[in-house]
Amino acid sequence: MYVAVKGGEAAIDAAHDWLAEERRGPTDIAELTLGQIKGQMSLAIARVMAEGSLYDPDLAALAIKQARGDLIEAIFLIRAYRTTLPRFGASHPVETGDMACDRRISATFKDLPGGQVLGPTFDYTHRLLDFKLAADGALAARDVAEDVAEAAPDTAPEPMPRVTEFLNAEGLIEPEVDPGEAPGDLTRAPLELPASRALRLQSLTRADEGFLLGMAYSTQRGYARNHAFVGELRIGTVPVEMDIPELGFAIEIGEITLTECETVNQFRGSETAPPQFTRGYGLVFGQTERKAISMALVDRALRWKELDEDDLGAPAQDEEFVLYHADNIQATGFLEHIKLPHYVDFQSETELLRRLRQAFAAAPIQAEAAE
Amino acid sequence: MDRKTWLSILAKADTAELSALWDALALAPAFSWLRRPQIGAVMVQGRAGGTGAAFNLGEMTVTRCTLQLENGPVGVGYVQGRDAAKAEIAALADALLQTAAAQAILDGLIEPLRAKAQARKAGRAAKADATRVDFFTLVRGEDG
């Protein structure tokens, strides 16, 4: 148990001064601006917004700068800040079907309405270090915008219907119907188990990317294998609409970038229902593709009860294990607290150990006999 | 244009563009605050599977305020992010759009903001379009 301690103020102040100095780094090198972080470390921004559970790129940039690039520390700062904000309300659910897509791919259909759009992806790069980026005044990248803007002026974007809709039309996949219930909110009430799918999704979308990736990977390797295909992955912007009480109608209060992944998984059927594909779902703030795919796989694994599947004892099926260990701020808070003074605890343990050793030394014969 | 449309354009506007256009209008209408700018959060919701049960995705920052022009209409500002000045401009514009000055605000502020947003969107759509691919499936050797 942590017990409050006194003293050390001067040392703590000096430590914080040094921290500020180390954060700044060599002063003969220009200081990072928030605009640079926001513009050039945009995937770090996305991760901090997703796991900090607050969409605000400027704040995420500030948090990353202050945290010296430690993203979990940055997420911690964002989580702490968001608790200070009054809640104005909840938005309407975002319409991801109408997303203005930067990227939209399907691993299940090669020819799909709206087409396959790669977007700014690392896929198909050779993963070789590009030393041109290390050189001052790196070569300017080909300006795609100017090339194509002239070629295709004012063409209305082709609609991109959901892949699951095609399968739905044939009845090949389980439908996803809105029961019209207000979702629970784990920022307002402690997470209790068993959790509704809405609460599981909220927990997963803000979960640690590494933890979720490991869990998702375990399902691929055979722990509760559910054979996921990426039916569709889309990244782009959607408007956020909210009812404004003083106006009496809804307006768009902003626009956010999201990554959505829908997986198509192996079927289930019963005596009363014909076999159908099942679904997993991932939706995450920002361009966060690895996280969204991981989320969809873990969501699907956690649905075993509602799909009447067997409990295979796999970690990814264990709601308590996944949901109670997925939050990196809870995890790091508890983990890191053990480095804080535990002197009283430790002292009592030491005294107990000394007594046990004294007892042992006083009775060597019994100890030998016991062997 | 209806009020919902202009309020949505104002909410999503780029702060620098909004300020520059507003300053160029050189308006300084007298007003009183009904609610001073306040920074808060809105819980954004998504749906399982895109169409199913709603769930809480995470919050976004929003700044809001309400003001009243002298002997005039009430303006409401709800804008994305943490920016009191942006919310104030939005609320002033909303109020003025309900007055005789409406056309000037539409021409000098709302339409240019919409055009800029549309151009940005078209630019991104064109970039995305340049990465559109056709995948061909090849016969695999082992299948003959």
Image (cartoon, coloured by chain):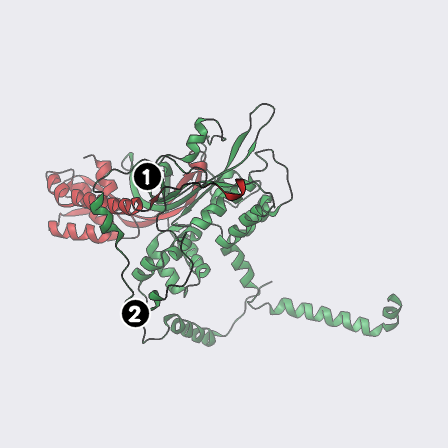
Chain colours: A green, B red
SS at mark 2? loop
The local crowd at label 2, few if under 14, some if 14 to 19, many if 20 or more residues have their Cα within 10 Å, is: few
Q: Is residue A149 visible?
A: yes
From the viewer's side, name the closer residue of B24 and A111.
A111
SS at mark 1? strand
Discs 2, 1 touching: Cβ within 8 Å: no
Q: Chain of mark 2?
A: A
Residue under label 2: A136
Residue under label 1: A241
Name which quarter of the figure residue A335 lies in: bottom right
Residue at figure coordinates x 49%, y 75% from the top left? A8
Can you say which quadrant of the picture contains the C terminus of chain A?
bottom right
* In this rendering, position of residue A119 left or right of residue A334: left
Nearer the observer: mark 2 or 1; the answer is 2
Name which quarter of the figure residue A140 lies in: bottom left
User: Closer to the N terminus: mark 2 or mark 1?
Assistant: 2
Q: Position of residue A263 (x, y in %)?
A: 48, 40
Name which quarter of the figure residue A74 lies in: bottom left
The local crowd at label 1, few if under 14, some if 14 to 19, many if 20 or more residues have their Cα within 10 Å, is: many
Residue at figure coordinates x 44%, y 52% from the top left? A51
